């Protein structure tokens, strides 16, 4: 009797421990994960901290791998087909190029951050000693838009009157100063303006590069003071991020591209029952250096040969008041997006119908749209993979206010899980 009672008690304890262990399995929504991972610094080619975040979230049972570039992935199952689902870890920004004797920091761009959005903005330099805050100095023509290119800058001499001169006097030439105007002492030029002026005017490419030179002010006045702060050549420089909640279900911030894709993959990895994957192979990957040339994906393509690649990245939508709706018009809040055509890939019609059928069966709203831009999946096509890019609709891409809708991200997450389960 005592032995029977002992066995019953032991069985109950074992069951309770199993239930408790199951409850302690980490779970999180893609929306909550996005709000965390988007704030982790990870300039293209310096994604180590974002890779650390991904590894810290994934359970050890998935046997996560990481290469020297900080690509992170895990593989489950065996057999064919081999499905790869990938999102990129990196974001746009700058690296410290050089320090000036005046105590400012000259930058070099990493990726296609829109230069006109950077001036007079707060940035953070991530140094070995910790973050250092600064401001990207505005250029002399900061207040001028493209349509005001012919207007005088703040440091220009005033324009002569365009009214008819008194009879007998010659009309002043456009852009000249009347003789009666007192001579002005030339204004001191910041380092960035001097550098821009040195660019050979006959070379448009070099002239544009000089125009895009950026200079950070840190509140000091010598190179030694900058170095004492810990700033060194090669440090990553990123916009000082802040999540703007436009509503409980809409947010805007820097690096939604592609941290939203990373968050969707993480959410599926945590919630999916991987014991279901037995007759096919599934790889989830978070790769690097997408914004500067798909280099992380190229490294992965050397070690894995998937049959299907689902690259999860933003769909730059024209869903805004000022844009033409004839192209890239995916409506925010209307579901996940399947890119049928972009600059780097054409998705076969059969695979589009296949994804649409899975989405319909799971009552997941999707939009099938065309766009410009490339995706990581395209580098696997040369080895026989089919590239099927998945997205969410977003606006203000490559700016500091990239917008995303919660329901779109959740729908994308559900679609990824359904594809993992049902794709054959």
Image (spheres, rainbow, N blue to C red):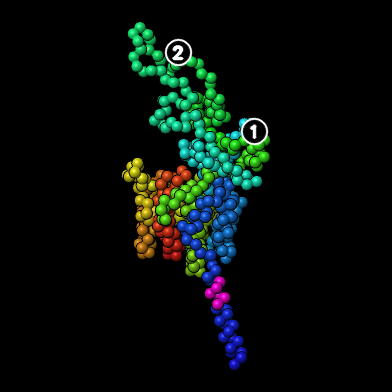
Left or right of 251 on screen, residue 192 = right
Task: Tell me where residue 347 appears, x and y as whole percent.
Answer: 40, 52
Whether residue 396 can be seen here: yes
- For disc 1, the marked residue is 222
Q: Residue furthest left?
A: 326
Residue 20: in magenta span: yes
> Residue drawn 35% across and 10% down?
166
Q: Residue at x 50, y 62 (%)?
A: 28
- Identified at 51% across, 47% down, the residue is 241
Quadrant occupied by the C terminus? bottom left
Residue 191: give x, y in percent of width and height: 57, 29
Residue 258 as seen in the image, left or right of residue 340: right
Q: How many marks?
A: 2
Element type at mark 2:
loop
Viewer-proximal residue among 112 and 74: 112
The answer to which image quadrant residue 303 occupies is bottom right
In this orientation, does residue 110 appear? no
- The kind of secondary structure element at disc 1 is loop
Q: Which residue is mark 2?
A: 180
Q: In the rendered image, which quarter contains the N terminus?
A: bottom right
Residue 422: x and y in percent read: 42, 64
CA neighbours of label 2 inside 10 A, class few (<14), some (14 to 19), many (20+): few
> What's the CA distance linking mark 1 and mark 2?
41 Å
Span of residues in magenta: 16-21
> Which one is closest to the eye, mark 1 or mark 2?
2
């Amino acid at each position: 009797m005592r032995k029977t009672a002992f066995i019953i008690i032991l069985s109950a304890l074992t069951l309770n421990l199993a239930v408790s262990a199951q409850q302690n399995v980490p779970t999180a929504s893609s929306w909550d994960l996005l709000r965390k991972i988007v704030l982790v610094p990870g300039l293209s080619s310096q994604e180590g901290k974002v890779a650390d975040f991904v590894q810290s979230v994934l359970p050890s049972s998935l046997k996560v791998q990481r290469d020297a570039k900080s690509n992170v992935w895990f593989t489950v199952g065996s057999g064919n087909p081999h499905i790869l689902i990938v999102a990129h870890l990196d974001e746009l920004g700058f690296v410290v190029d050089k320090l000036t004797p005046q105590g400012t920091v000259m930058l070099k761009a990493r990726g296609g951050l829109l230069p006109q959005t950077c001036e007079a903005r707060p940035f953070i330099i991530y140094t070995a000693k910790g973050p250092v805050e600064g401001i990207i100095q505005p250029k002399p023509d900061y207040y001028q838009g493209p349509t005001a290119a012919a207007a005088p800058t703040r440091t220009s001499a005033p324009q002569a009157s365009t009214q008819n001169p008194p009879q007998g006097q010659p009309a002043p030439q456009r852009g000249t100063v009347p003789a009666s105007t007192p001579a002005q002492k030339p204004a001191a030029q910041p380092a960035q303006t001097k550098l821009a002026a040195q660019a050979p005017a006959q070379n448009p490419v070099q002239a544009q590069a000089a125009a895009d030179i950026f200079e950070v002010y840190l509140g000091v006045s010598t190179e030694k003071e900058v170095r004492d702060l810990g700033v060194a050549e090669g440090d990553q420089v990123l916009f000082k991020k802040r999540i703007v909640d436009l509503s409980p279900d809409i947010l805007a911030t820097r690096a939604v591209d592609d941290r939203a894709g990373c968050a969707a993959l993480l959410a599926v990895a945590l919630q999916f029952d991987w014991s279901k994957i037995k007759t096919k192979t599934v790889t989830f990957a978070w790769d690097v250096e997408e914004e500067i040339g798909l280099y992380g994906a190229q490294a992965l393509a050397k070690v894995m040969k998937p049959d299907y690649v689902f690259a999860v990245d933003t769909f730059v939508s024209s869903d805004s008041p000022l844009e033409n709706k004839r192209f890239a018009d995916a409506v925010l809040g209307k579901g996940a997006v399947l890119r049928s055509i972009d600059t780097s890939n054409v998705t076969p019609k059969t695979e589009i119908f296949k994804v649409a059928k899975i989405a319909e069966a799971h009552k997941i709203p999707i939009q099938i749209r065309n766009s410009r831009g490339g995706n990581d999946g395209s580098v696997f096509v040369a080895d026989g993979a089919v590239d099927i890019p998945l997205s969410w609709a977003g606006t203000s891409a490559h700016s500091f206010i990239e917008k995303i809708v919660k329901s779109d991200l959740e729908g994308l997450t559900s679609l990824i899980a359904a594809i993992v389960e049902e794709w054959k």
